[in-house]
Image (cartoon, rainbow, N blue to C red):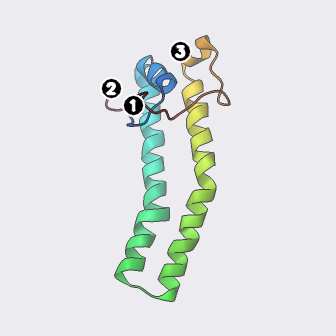
């Protein structure tokens, strides 16, 4: 398991794809993860920190609006991730498509 492609709730399909990634595909996936981290900071962390540190109707309203934007855009980010995973060499040979790929999975008990 490579820490650069590991996620705590990965589905088995995602683990297989990540396990067969080339080095350049892993770097590309890390870049996508970095962009997602920036997106979370801009739409969640910073606005919420400002709303807690400087509570006013303006900061709280701004934080709520950005939270809504984040929630609306979350499916888009997940679709981008699926497209990226399915564009890897190994996933293409196995016939994975973004519509069929399950990103998250739970362990069976």
56 versus 102 height, above or below? below
Q: Is residue 33 above or below residue 16?
A: below
**Residue 95 percent coordinates (x, y):** 64, 15
Where does the N terminus fall, quadrant-wise?
Answer: top left
Q: Secondary structure at mark 3?
A: helix
Give me the residue at 44% from left, 24% from top. 15
Q: Rate crowding at label 1 as few (under 14), some (14 to 19) or many (20 or more) other CA atoms within 10 Å.
A: some
Name the residue at the front extreme: 109
Residue at 54%, 22% in the rendered image: 88
Q: Position of residue 25 (x, y in %)?
A: 47, 26
Q: Residue at label 1? A: 5
Q: Earlier in the sequence, mark 1 or mark 3?
A: 1
Alpha carbon of mark 1 to alpha carbon of mark 3: how far? 15 Å
Q: Is residue 54 left or right of residue 103?
A: left
Q: Residue 39 — which label?
A: none
- Contact (Cβ within 8 Å) of mark 1 with mark 2: yes
**Circles 3 and 2: CB atoms closer than 8 Å:** no
The boundaries of the magenta stretch are 1-5
Vertical side of 86 occupied by 68: above or below:
below
| Residue under numbered circle 3 | 90
């Amino acid at each position: 398991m490579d820490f650069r492609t590991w996620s705590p709730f990965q589905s088995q399909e995602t683990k297989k794809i990540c396990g067969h990634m080339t080095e350049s595909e892993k770097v590309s996936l890390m870049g996508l993860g970095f962009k997602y981290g920036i997106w979370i900071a801009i739409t969640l962390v910073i606005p919420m920190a400002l709303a807690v540190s400087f509570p006013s109707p303006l900061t709280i309203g701004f934080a709520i609006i950005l939270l809504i934007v984040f929630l609306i855009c979350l499916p888009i980010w997940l679709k981008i991730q699926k497209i990226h995973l399915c564009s890897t060499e190994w996933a293409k040979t196995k016939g994975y498509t973004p519509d069929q790929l399950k990103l998250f999975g739970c362990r069976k008990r």
